[in-house]
């Protein structure tokens, strides 16, 4: 994933993310009780994740999921 800026190169509210789809897939297990947040930090539920959702999945050195961010 590469970050990009809107015209004028201003960060902040106009910042956006461009995704390069590689076709790679990976299965992950989201542990029960793990907090899922939205891009603005608000709480989300597992049921908010739908087919086609874009997730930021953060893992530790043991490949265990430590954080999930749902980008809508």
Image: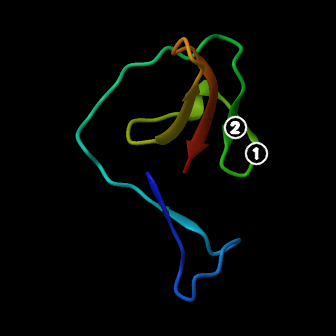
Residue drawn at x 39%, y 36% as measured from the top left: 51
Q: Quadrant of residue 68?
A: top right
Residue 45 at x, y percent in the picture: 66, 29
Name the residue that disc number 2 marks.
37
Quick check: 2 above or below 51?
A: below
Q: Determine crowd level at label 1: few under 14, some 14-19, many 20+ residues with C-alpha closer than 10 A.
A: few
Residue drawn at x 65%, y 10% as measured from the top left: 32
Q: Mark 2 and mark 1 in contact (Cβ < 8 Å)?
A: yes
Residue drawn at x 30%, y 30% as measured from the top left: 25
Q: Which mark is residue 41?
A: 1
Q: Quadrant of residue 53?
A: top left
Residue drawn at x 53%, y 79% as measured from the top left: 6
Residue 28 at x, y percent in the picture: 45, 18
Q: Which mark is residue 3?
A: none
Quick check: 50 above or below 66?
A: below
Front residue of 52 and 63 = 63
Q: Quadrant of residue 18?
A: bottom left
From the viewer's perspective, tell me whether residue 30 is left or right of residue 25.
right
Residue 50 at x, y percent in the picture: 46, 35
The CA span between labels 1 and 2 is 5 Å
Secondary element at image label 2? strand
Residue 66 at x, y percent in the picture: 65, 21
């Amino acid at each position: 994933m590469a970050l990009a800026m809107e015209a004028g190169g201003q960060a902040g509210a106009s910042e956006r993310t461009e995704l390069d789809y590689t076709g790679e897939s990976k299965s992950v297990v989201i542990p029960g009780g793990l907090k899922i947040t939205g891009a603005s930090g608000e709480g989300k539920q597992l049921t908010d994740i739908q087919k086609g959702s874009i997730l930021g999945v953060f893992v530790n050195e043991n490949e265990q999921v430590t954080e999930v961010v749902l980008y809508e």
